[in-house]
Amino acid sequence: MPNAIIVGASSGIGRALAKELSRDYDLGLAARRIERLKAVGEDIGGAHVAKIDVTEADARERFDDLVESLGGVDLVVLSSGIGRYNPDLEWEDERDTIDVNVRGFTALATAAMEQFEASDGGHLVGLSSVASEVGSPTMPAYSASKAYVSRYLEGLRYRADDDDVAVTDIRPGFVDTPMSPEADRFWECSPETAASQITRAIEKEKNVAYVTRRWWLVSKVLGLLPDRYRASVM
Ligand SMILES: NC(=O)c1ccc[n+]([C@@H]2O[C@H](COP(=O)([O-])OP(=O)(O)OC[C@H]3O[C@@H](n4cnc5c(N)ncnc54)[C@H](OP(=O)(O)O)[C@@H]3O)[C@@H](O)[C@H]2O)c1
């Protein structure tokens, strides 16, 4: 079986994706909460687990160790991320969001690309968001960090044009996870539905995939709306 690593597998979309991908891949699971990772591993019949904080200086080294323990990697999913409601623009919240979603994301994305380029190629999948497409008045660092994720993945895809490297940008709308505890938001889906649609996008090596697929429509509408209405959509 091919090998896959999910960073951010201790909760939400990453955890649901671990279940989906365990049918076709030997898995390496990473996040900070190692006990939760072990429980996810037991749930899916076994996985390599590693404690990785993507903001720490040793994150790339720990990722490389996980690759080594798996004996190589074919697919890397970067699902780790934070999103804090921050209407008062508290600097600590904005800083932490940038640390995890921008700096930490880039640390792991470059580590994954190094692995792919040193072997027979591979597939990098990043979790962006529909929020990447409109500035959020209450979570500005979050929406900006996801715009960064999408543009960064696009750059990696263009860079990898002639190689055996695929790059997929996943843009969920609302998914019912600990990150977004508000109940009953429109077009909200379960982490399991998100994981199943992400798996399909991975199989098809999509460049960009909206989750659920109907969020593509929101993206198009966002592009047409006058400024004063755009912020109220997300
Ligand atoms: N839920 C939504 O509505 C939604 C919508 C659009 C996009 N997304 C994106 O989807 C991804 C997954 O979100 P989710 O909804 O599944 O949220 P979640 O349930 O809160 O899961 C977030 C994951 O990120 C990990 N993480 C956070 N900080 C980390 C760090 N410093 N180092 C390593 N791992 C870290 C967490 O693990 P530990 O705490 O154990 O480290 C956890 O496994 C995120 O990138 C999010 O922005 C979510």
Image (spheres, grey):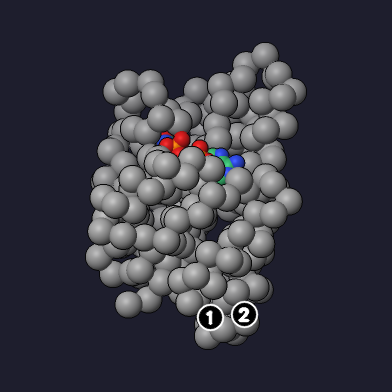
Q: Nearer the viewer, residue 113 or 29?
A: 29
Q: Is residue 156 left or right of residue 190?
A: right
The label on residue 80 is none
Give x and y (percent) for residue 177. Answer: 37, 33
Q: Residue at x 26, y 50 (%)?
A: 43
Give x and y (percent) for residue 181. Answer: 39, 24
Q: Residue at x 34, y 25 (%)?
A: 185
Q: Residue at x 57, y 83 (%)?
A: 119
Give the class, few, some or many, for how many residues have Cα within 10 Å of label 1's Cα (few <14, many ≥20): some
> Which residue type does callout 1 highlight?
Gly
Give x and y (percent) for residue 60. Answer: 66, 60
What whole-number distance in Å separates the C-alpha atoms at marks 2 and 1? Answer: 6 Å
Please identify the quadrant where the N terminus is shown. Answer: bottom left
Give x and y (percent) for residue 73. Answer: 48, 73
- Element at badge 1? loop
CB of mark 2 within 8 Å of CB of mark 1? yes
Furthest toward the top, the residue is 88
> Which residue type does callout 2 highlight?
Glu
Q: Is residue 5 left or right of residue 24?
A: right
The label on residue 117 is 2
| Residue corresponding to mark 1 | 121
Label 2 C-beta lies within 8 Å of the nearest ligand 1 atom: no
